[in-house]
Image (cartoon, rainbow, N blue to C red):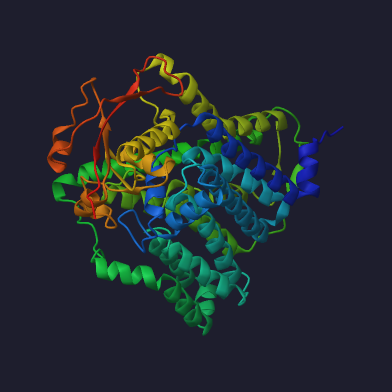
Amino acid sequence: MRFTSLVVELIRARPRLVVWIVVLAQAAIWLFLPLILYRSPPGDLATVLAFGREYQVGTDMGPPLSFWLTDIAYRAAGNHIFGVYLLAQICAVATFIAFYQLSRAIVGGQQAVLAVLLSMTAVVFSSPSVEFGPLILARPLWALLLLHSWQLIGQNRRSAWFAWSIDCGLLLLTTHAAIGMILLVAGFALATARGRRTLRAVDPLYALLVVVVLALPYLIWLIRADVLTVPPLPAVADLAARATRWGVVLGGLVVAAAAIVLLAILNSSTFSREADDAPIIYRPHIDPLARQYVFFFALAPGVIGSFIAGLFDLDRSFGGAGVALLMSGLAVVVASGDLIHLRRQRLLRTVWAAAIAAPAAFTIAGSLFLPWISSTETPTSLPASAIGHFFDDSFERRTNQRLRAVAGDPQLASLIAMESRRPHLLLDATPQRTPWLSMQKFNETGGVVVWRASDTSGTPPPEIAQRFPGLAPEVPRAFEWLVNGRQPLLRIGWGIVRPKAP
């Protein structure tokens, strides 16, 4: 007698419900885990907040949309980082729901669930979903762009042109890789007969007009800032190193997708000794163009993105690993045929759950146990709230004015700019990156200058002393980590630039 688990029956009867349960559960993990474990935001999130509060049309960190949304979410949550974490998880949910809609249009609802489950293992493992920024916001926009592009090319739905233009315009306001993403879609359309037929209509001209209107402010900023330049190509002597870099980035994408490969191998009939009476997930025969569409967008973003990363010596795939690996699960489902047998169901569930839980387990181990076995600093263990409130209160007590600006060590200054009453951030080592505040303006309004202190004297580093002549250092302040372990206390040297009288 064939046994069918409740999970398989749910996939068959209520595929959309299964997707919502899985996606929301994953989002809940990454919403509450950082709230419990992180005393400071991960990565460059504090800097993103500092840039976002200025509402610049463009900065050296990229187009403005993700920075604006970060500040809006932070303010909406009462100046609490919870709003930003929630925004990141909304993007994660939107990504997989849009991806499910695309998969359902190609392989049907039942196999679309499998595509979502497989792609989740690669996307969640490849890059963090908490550090909101351009890479996180680009994921749902890319998923929506793929969905609406298929509706135009594969389903001939003219009503999707407006949504397609909105996707493109928002992508251009989100990431530098947007032009490459749009060119990939346009290239696929030009390479296929149905795609060329879609482009012959007048609708693409109206869509292009909407895209230009949406992206026009940022395009004007690019022209006025004179940053429309292509990075220099590497010298011939550097080609070997750049090729190695390409291989490393591409290999990282392959490793991130290893769980998909493992699940496919475990589900293969080659390694099954039992009779082939496993439950079947069925799909109708798919369009040959859909097969080409899936394989192209499963391979091209990763290969081309890693090549650009190697060519220009970037530390990650151009556009982000989440974009490059989004279609990987659907590609495996399409390649598996119209009938997918689910063998070794318990083992498959265990391996899938382990792949999804692994990043969370690494995060818990890094926050709670790494300080006891290593002296390596955990960036998310910095007591951001205590640091911000101390320097804000110290400046106000000494000057009888609220803190308006902070400079010095970029990491510490960004935390103070986020946690206190949100003073302006000045990157004094690279002041061109923070055009809203100059050194002259900083000396007029006053502010706090901070640095890492290696002793109790609090002597500022030579480069800070040179940029702030006459700065009188205060007694360094010591702060405890989330888990001290083998780490010494965090000592922060600081000094006050007093505001000039009007």
Q: Residue at (69%, 52%) from the top-left corner? A: 338
Residue 478: image x %, image y %?
A: 34, 23
**Dividing the picture into quarters, in which one does residue 64 lie?**
bottom left
- Answer with left or right where residue 14 lies relative to residue 207: right
Q: Is residue 282 above or below residue 488?
A: below
Q: Provide residue 149's location: percent of width, then percent of height.
A: 55, 67
From this viewpoint, which residue is outermost toward the bottom? 202
Q: Quadrant of residue 140?
A: bottom right
In the image, residue 84 lies at what x, y percent? Answer: 51, 47
**Can residue 317 be seen here?**
no
Q: Nearer the viewer, residue 125 or 216?
A: 216
Is residue 137 shown to the viewer in this render?
A: yes
Q: In this view of the protein, which residue sits in the foreground, 389 or 408? A: 389
Front position in the image: 431 or 33: 431
Quarter placement of the N terminus: top right
Q: Residue at x 67, y 32 (%)?
A: 349
* Quadrant showing the C terminus: bottom left
Q: Is residue 144 left or right of residue 134?
A: right
Camera-side residue of 115 and 66:
66
Q: Is residue 42 shown left or right of residue 76?
A: left
- Which residue appears at 50% of the width and 46% of the height? 79
